[in-house]
Image (tube, rainbow, N blue to C red):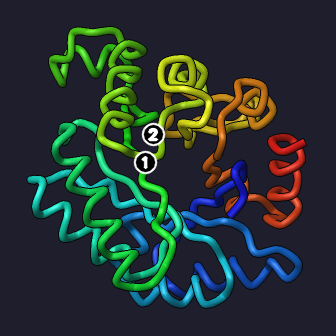
Amino acid sequence: MNKKDVIIALDFKDRAETMDFLQRFTDEKPFVKIGMELFYGEGPDIVREIKDRGHSIFLDLKLHDIPMTVKKAMKNLALLGVDMTNLHCAGTIEMMKYAMDGLTEGALEAGREKALLIGVTQLTSTSEERMQKELLINASINDCIVKYAENAKEAGLDGVVCSPLEAAMVKDACGKSFLTVTPGIRYPGAEVQDQVRVTSPADARAIGTDYIVVGRPITKAEDPVAAYRKVCADFLG
């Protein structure tokens, strides 16, 4: 698995759509993200099948529950052989530590390298106004994201999910080796849909983020392979 990469979000409703999309890639095996819609629709077998096709997988289920429940869930996710998975930093440092323990135990049991564990700071669909008015978090969104990242580092996580706009702040607070995984990637002039904090692949590279997660700019393109290659060129150089 590369230390910097483009991750394609497989935001499809079922296995048929997903495999139809992946079959377009005959020369590459892109790093892909399996989210709630696909996982809950198809179950863990979809993870195994895509893994068997040679793809690295970010399993994006954003766990958030009591510490022991998250630990046991993470152990099961590790047994699937995913390369990256995540949880909500809002679940507290204790929950994140338990999650890391579960992921480590599962990797040892399966005889695999431990997956990267990253924490969600604030969703890219969340604005500062919504965070303050609806969630009653009175800090600025930047201060909140940096604090959540610091908590994740203290818990032993490998990095966090944040928008590219906050990646540099996270790196400054937690060190260059602390990973930032950033959705909210759009080209200038494109519709942002449900995203609020967005930037382009080239800007994400300049900011210094490690992984970008790209969905509709690739999956909805007329030529997804060409779109993927363009994003890779713009982000990886």
Residue 107 in the image: above or below residue 90? below
Whether residue 10 is visible: yes
Task: Tell me the quarter of the image containing the N terminus.
Answer: bottom right
Q: Which mark is residue 160?
A: 2
Residue 207 versus residue 42: which sits nearer the camera?
207
Residue at coordinates 53% horizontally, 67% vertically from top-left?
83
Name which quarter of the figure residue 98 lies in: bottom left
Whether residue 43 is visible: no
The residue that label 1 is drawn on is 118
Where is residue 134 drawn, in percent x and y? Answer: 18, 22
**Type of amino acid under label 1:** Ile
**Type of amino acid under label 2:** Val
The reply to whether dot 2 and dot 1 touch (C-beta < 8 Å) is yes
| Mark 2 to mark 1 CA distance (whole Å) | 5 Å
Circle 1: element type: strand
Residue 204 versus residue 214: which sits nearer the camera?
204
Where is residue 51 drawn, in percent x and y? Answer: 58, 83
Circle 2: element type: strand
Q: Is residue 132 left or right of residue 80?
A: left
Residue at coordinates 41% horizontally, 81% vertically from top-left?
80
